Image: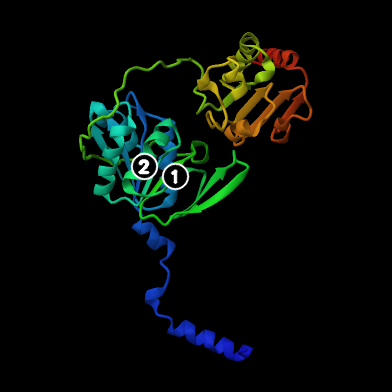
Amino acid sequence: MIPIARHSALRAVRSQLAPRAFNQPTASALARLLSTLAVLEQRDGKLQGSSLSAIAAAQKLGGPVTAFVAGTGVKGTSAAEAAKIKGLDKVVAVESEAYEKGLPENYAPLLVENIKKGEYTHIIGGHSAFGKSLLPRVAALLDVQQVSDITGIESEDTFVRPIYAGNAILTVQSSDPIKVITVRGTAFQGLETEGGSAEIVEGVDPKAPAQTEWVSEELAKSERPDLGTASRVVSGGRGLKSKEEFDRVIVPLADTLGAAIGASRAAVDSGFADNSLQVGQTGKNVAPQLYLCAGISGAIQHLAGMKDSKVIAAINKDPDAPIFQVADVGLVGDLFEKVPELTEKLKNQA
């Protein structure tokens, strides 16, 4: 055993003799080594919400941030829109009709070619249908592991993500030379979309042959706010019993509040609402200022998609329903009486 006094002396000598070459790099030094590419999603020349989340997450890493977008005539539309975002260094754009629909089979080789050219250390995209189909292919082509659906960034190689429908939080550290990441949109917001002046540059187009063909699409159009970005959401569950009751009870309340309409998986599976309105683990993640739900018991799969809402209000006849454990405001009662009554009172106040 070394006496305490001698041990202190040895420790002092070691600290003086320790070569500076072996000191760990500082956070600022690591930031200078970082170079992040934010993959943007566009539809008909307009940036989607997942793109803004990707840029917001990239800026949290530090270091220069470059955005990437491809499609028909993107230089004058979505690339120009991205160039105005504060904090972007440049926007890499590839104009080609082949990438307009974002088919991952030919979009992935395109992205990989531009990643290699730019020597980026981090690739970030939104955890949307576009990002979830594209970035796993990119990670495979780069021979690295993807880190999915992150909600926090601790350092340049350490990230936080929910698992088990949000019941546990996992901290992941990646040693891969290139980090391929998808981010949860509700966790990265507050981006300034004006005031930037990023340079738009031409990207590399490998002209990879497409293995799939775009046939058609059917889009559900509505004058209501988009579910993924709305500040208010009114959701209905299986307790509404039928599509007719769903439309009679939920729609007037949503219209009165100027809110988007959501639904639980049980309501969607029962045919009460369209699949595009599903909120939850296998649906959309939302984080509005107000989330008002009726007839939803509160299964963990549903809570995973809405628990980040600022204010959660629930109406259910079962006082022991799990939804009341996360609700800020709860009303126990028959939704077929309480919701129309609430709608009428809101109309009178308006």
Image quadrant where residue 263 sits: top right
Give the side of residue 315 with respect to residue 117, left or right. right
Q: Which residue is mark 2?
A: 38
Sooner in the amino-acid sequence: mark 2 or mark 1: 2
Image quadrant where residue 57 sits: top left
In this rendered view, identify the residue nearer to me: 233 or 118. Answer: 118
In this rendered view, identify the residue nearer to me: 144 or 193. Answer: 144
Image quadrant where residue 207 sits: top left
**Residue 158 in the image: x percent, y percent?**
48, 54
What residue lies at 59% left-to-right and 41% top-to-bottom? Answer: 164
What residue lies at 63% left-to-right and 42% top-to-bottom? Answer: 167
In the displayed orientation, state which residue is furthest to the front. Answer: 211
Q: Residues within 10 Å of mark 2 (few under 14, many from 20)?
A: many
**Could you tell me if the residues under marks 2 and 1 are in contact, i.e. CB atoms within 8 Å?**
yes
What residue lies at 35% left-to-right and 52% top-to-bottom? Answer: 121
What's the residue type where badge 1 is placed?
Answer: Ala
Q: Which residue is mark 1?
A: 57
